[in-house]
Amino acid sequence: MPPSPGLFYQVHFYLFGLLAIASALAFVTRKSPIAAALWLVSVMFNLAALYVMMDAHFVGAIQVLVYAGAIMVVFLFVVMLLNLGHADELSDIRGTWGRIAAGAVGLALLAQIMAMSRTRFLSVLQPPTNPVFGGPPDRGAIGTVAQPLFTEHLLAFELTSILLLTAIVGAVAVGKRKGANDT
Amino acid sequence: MAAFLAGIHYNAWILPVLLLIPTIGAVLVWAHGAVAGQGEAASMTARRLTLATFVLEFVLSIGLWWSLDQQSADWQAVFDAPWIEAWGTRFALGVDGLSVMMVLLTTFLMPLAILGGWTSVKAKVHAYHALMLLLTTGMLGVFVAKDLFLFYVMWEVMLIPMYFIIGIWGGERRIYASLKFFIYTMAASLLMLVAIVYLGIMAGEPLGRPTFDYDAILALNLPPAATFWLFGAFFLAFAVKVPMFPFHTWLPDAHVEAPTAGSVILAGILLKLGTYGFLRIALPFFPGVAMYPAVRTAIIALAVIGVVYGSLVALVQPDIKKLVAYSSVAHLGFVMLGIFALTVESVQGALMVMIGHGLSTGALFLLVGIIYERTHTRLIDAYGGIAKVVPLFATILTVVALSSIGLPGTNGFVAEFLVMIGSFRTYPMMTFVSATGVILAAAYMLWALQRMIYNKLDKPQNAALRDLNWRELGLLVPILAGILWMGVYPQPVLNRMEASARKLVTDVTRNAERQQASMMMGGR
Amino acid sequence: MIPEALALSAVLFTIGAIGVLTRRNAILIFMCVELMLNAVNLTFVALSKLYGVTGQVFVVFVMTVAAAEAAVGLAIIIAIFRHGQTVNLKNINLLKG
Amino acid sequence: MLLQEAAGAAHPLSGTLAEWIWLVPALPFLGFVVNGLLSLVPATHLGPADPSAAGHEHGQAGHEDRGAHDDHHHVTRHRNAGIVSLVGPAVLGLAFALTAAIFIGMLGAHAEAPFVRTLFPWIVTGDLTLNAALQVDQLSIVMTMVVTGVGFLIHVFSVGYMQDDPGYPRYFAYLNLFVFFMLVLVLGASYPVMFVGWEGVGLCSYLLIGFWFTDKANADAGKKAFVMNRIGDFGFLVAMFLLFANLGTLDFAAVSGRAAELGEGGAVITAIGLFFFLGCAGKSAQIPLYTWLPDAMAGPTPVSALIHAATMVTAGVYLVARSAAIFSLTPVASLTVALVGAITALFAATIGLKQWDIKKVLAYSTVSQLGYMFIGVGVGAYSAGVFHLVTHAFFKALLFLGSGSVIFAMHRAFHHTGSHADAQDMRNMGGLRRFMPWTFGLMWIATLAIAGIPPLSGFFSKDEILASVFARTSHSTLAEASWAGIPGSALLMLIYVLGLAAALLTAVYMTRMMLYTFHGPNRSGDAERSHLAEAPWIMTIPLAVLGVLSATGGLINLPAFLGAPAQKLHHWLEPVTGAASMHITHGEEAHLALGTEMALIALAVAIAVAGMAYAYARLKPAALVPKDQSPAAHGIERVLEHKYYVDEIYDRTIVRPVVALSRRVLWRGMDTGLIDGLFVNGSAYFMRSLGWMGARLQSGQVGTYAWVLVIGVLAVLGAFSLS
């Protein structure tokens, strides 16, 4: 079992956790997409904080940089572009029945996950007997992630690059306006 | 005559030739259609060509009448050629007492059916006649097939042209009727295919590859449990075709919507395939099940219900063709009663009803077709008092109607009398109930007859009806001759069927006891 | 502290799922999907403390995929918007069976 | 004498004229063919405009209706009427001559066993060997004599009666066909051959009743007759099946020889007897299947005379007499026959009292007299039954033909003045004595005969039956048997009393008919009166011959106490029915003490005279008014006039429910509803709805997909966590 972390660590962990949940709830219930997007950004910041607390410094940074910074910006950009800001037209939350049903389904999902965590795990999912606690800090935040990335998962890494390339080309192709010189 | 036939080895080549001629005819007529187009002249040549083919077919098949050896009950005029080696199916043909009369009935009715539709079919004449020729190959194929696989193939070959004939040249609701007819028969016969394949494999066990030869399968002794579902499969396929009581609803629709010639063949020959199937396959192959008391009584009960139900419903039909269709259900009920009562007289009676019904109902449909051509209505109440205007038509309709309700002196009586007197010995109560069918038959037929040809001539459009012309008369006289001949002197026909009927009865009863005994010991 | 992290991730995931179910606006549904992906990333990170750093590597991959997906998805939404002037899911049913 | 199988060659009759017996039915068939072809020729020589000229076979399109209630048509005579009127009766005459010759031949030969002439094997398969064979024995030759003899006279009468009907050849074709089938019935050597004739005559009566088929009432009457006969035939069929199932043979000789094997008084033999009687009830119009006979009067009058008085309706009596061996072994069936006969006799007589149509009166009188014959053959006095059959054929044919000439005269009168009055209704007649002396005289002879006034034939035959019933009340197998609890002797006494009552009523309604028709003032209107005249000689001569026969008919079978010349018919029928009737009376001739017999005769005569006197006194023909002015009857008279509403009861209790059942329940409900609706179209609808549900899933709404996704996840997790 990992050494019990200090009280300071626990408090901050719970703080960021609750903040994340609160902002997620806010995100889901906002009518206007812009407010929703901003709440989502706040969720991401809290998560980044949690990553750092769990010694995943590089991932935390990436989270803020890429996720909150890039992807959410693109979202906001598109919302602005399509002028979807005003809330009334998109009162899209489907009536009380929709929400109650969604809530019920959510609770059921949660209950099942909790129930699952109680059940006996399959052998392959058992936590290893010699857990790596925190890992050696020697390679620094980026090194600990970069080393396996460029050795074991090199192929996956290359593939993601190709993926990004196609995504960009696809986005441009789809998004392009149907101009006269279109073949 | 028999000597002459033996001289030219008639028996060796007759059956394949009988199947081949219509196919060649079909190809010729179809090709002629493609070449000469659809003009009136071309259509007329198509009709003449088809008629010639059928007349040739009939002339050839008459030889069978003499060449059949009346004493022996096993296969005659056998023709055997390899077909698909891998599956062990052979192009084996043969004829015996049960099927010879059906072959003759087919070749006798076909030219008359074509003559019947001479002027009523105007659109796509070539296709129509090509399909008719193909249909004949299918029907004849089923009657003479000695190989079970060939039996099934011909069963389907016969189904497709009929579907098109009803579907294209039929009445208003023809699509619904032809679809219903096709799906009803096809669905039931798929089960039969499964059973045939199972039998083929079981029979082929010792040879290493499946064989569908009739005698090989006949010699098989199957586990009792298997025989039940096998019989069930065959029963369903044939019961739909007969049609027996609960499976009969396709018949009125198919009859009402089919063109005249279609109805004649549908009633005259196609219905007999079901009963022929029982006689040829269901009974000899699974005597234990067929004669099992519960199964046998149930089937006979269904047959008797069919007789009474068919007659009662025919009583209230406004449409003459539907009335005749339901009367066919009643007549076929008698056939099933005859078959499952299993005495020599009742089986002979069943065969006679099959032939007699072919003639009487065929003639009825031809007559309805003739009057329909003039008035374009099938409703009985649209007529009335036409005996004064078309006396010849009225007389022939009366004679045929009387033969259909079984008046002595016509084929109807001889057939139904034999069925009932035969089945009375094994199932007295059931025969008693089916005998009431005789009264109901008189009721519905005479009531319809009176509303059509007697009573006041009150509808102006009926006053100007033309009586029968020479073609129509020439078409009906042979059938009338057949009806009266089989009524007064049926002996030659009976002699030809006696040996096979006796063999069927003795074999089935003997095997039934043996199988039921093994069933009791083996238990299920 | 891992169990708490996993519980948090489960809650976030559920909220994301609820968001997807209740929303009609295509873009907001995308965002909810992003939220669900973040929840999964959280699990990865939490468990990477036990199973080693491959978890974090995986998070990187998830992020790249999320980015690609967002890009393409938004492009499609723009195309749809240009076509039907709406992103309300109710009217976008060209895929009707 | 047990009827042993006749050795073909050694039979006394073989080689004699009897070999040509097949010619007797063949001649009328030849007549049918000739007349049938002639009727194909266009009916009349009128201009093309006349529709009747266009028609052929049933050519007489525009024919005029000789029947009672038809409007005015011009009279058109068929072109070939001459040939037909020669061929028709000639064929019958030849047949009668041949039969008479054979009869004389038989007189000398007094053959014991029947002579069976086999023509060709009809249906031979399995254990059933059925030959188309004719049988010549004492009973069949008597019947053939009656059929051809009376038939010939009626044919001659028809030449006059139907001469102006354009359907003349068709009429004679049917009449000849009828006689052919009747001869096949009477001469058949086995039950199925007899059945051929049995249904054949049913067919011909259908064709002849509906001869003027343009009138719905006639066509309906024909259909009703055929269907009711068919119900009877159903009984006949079942009896044949029972016989075949138990004895394995259907030939008369074999069956009567081995009848004992069926077990005396057993269930099987009683069933056979009862089913045979059902056949007789259908054909000979006994209760409950008698309603078709009065309606059969819709046909031409000579047809009523031939078919519905003399020949066809007596087929039932012939059947019982022919299967005497079976009936004698089953007292229950025989008692049923006698009882139903007695009840029918009385019941029909009561209806006859209040009928106004002259032919309806005679029709009910026939039903009643048939009841008498069944009493005779029922109690085992087969020769008495046949004797009454013969005499009845004479005087009933005379009565019908007489009424025919009356109607002919009335119709000609109404025809001249163009009035539409009913030529058959007695209220329009009256006082015809002065106009038709011959018919009047001969009709009185027949009326006296039927009433049973000695020395006419009716008296002898009716008295013979009543005497034989009385003789069997004691010391006979019937008396000892019990019928549904009632002892046989009491039942026979009841039958005797019913018979007497029927005789009384017969005398009353016959006298009533004579009074209203011939006596009192003439009510057919002044203009018509001048045209009323005697029927032409060709119609009156047959009447005269029948008159002689009715008067002298009694000589055939004088009562026993008159010594030598008595009981000729009884001894003549000895070889056929002797053994059976002896069996019923325990082996020795049933005889009454002379005293009782004389008393019975006196009683019968007194009854007859009383009936006639009562009618003469009570009825006042002068008070009658023509039909259109006569007030509607009420109370018991109305019930009788409407024949106890039996037809309406049948219609409402049997016909209408069956039609309704088959239309609503069977056709609509079962066929189109259950089988078509539920299974056939139902399964099609079920497949289509499955498809529709599938389509609903692919609704294009991405939202629904998300839902389905999540629910799927839940399901998987649930399964996982529960496992």
Image (spheres, coloured by chain):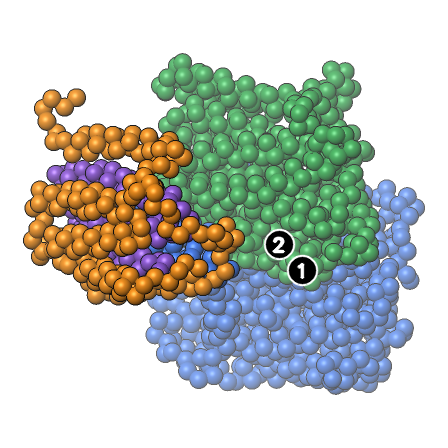
Chain colours: A orange, B green, C purple, D blue
- Label count reads 2
Q: Is residue D213 left or right of residue B220?
A: left
Q: Which residue does the image show at 65% across and 54% down from the upper left?
A: B299
Query: Which mark is on residue B303?
Result: 2
Nearest the viewer among B25 and B261 is B25
- Around disc 1, counting alpha carbons within 10 Å, would you say few (fewer than 14), some (14 to 19), or many (20 or more)? many
Q: Is residue C73 above or below residue B249?
A: above
Residue D682 quadrant: bottom left
Q: Are marks 1 and 2 in contact (CB under 8 Å)?
A: yes
Residue A67 quadrant: top left
Residue D390, given in percent of the width and then of the height, sits at 70, 63
User: Label 2 is placed on what type of residue?
Assistant: Ala
Q: Mark 1 vs mark 2: tell me if same chain.
A: yes
Chain for numbered disc 1: B
Give the residue at mark 1. Answer: B430
Nearest the viewer among D263 and C81 is C81
Q: Quadrant of the N terminus of chain D?
A: bottom right
Chain for numbered disc 2: B
Q: Is residue D495 above or below residue B192?
A: below
Q: CA distance from mark 1 to mark 2?
A: 9 Å
Q: Is residue D544 left or right of residue B342?
A: left
Q: Is residue D381 above or below residue A106?
A: below
Q: Which residue does the image show at 64% across and 41% down from the upper left?
A: B195
Residue D261, given in percent of the width and then of the height, sits at 87, 63
Query: Which tag, 1 or 2, sits closer to the chain's start?
Result: 2
- Around disc 2, counting alpha carbons within 10 Å, would you say few (fewer than 14), some (14 to 19), or many (20 or more)? many
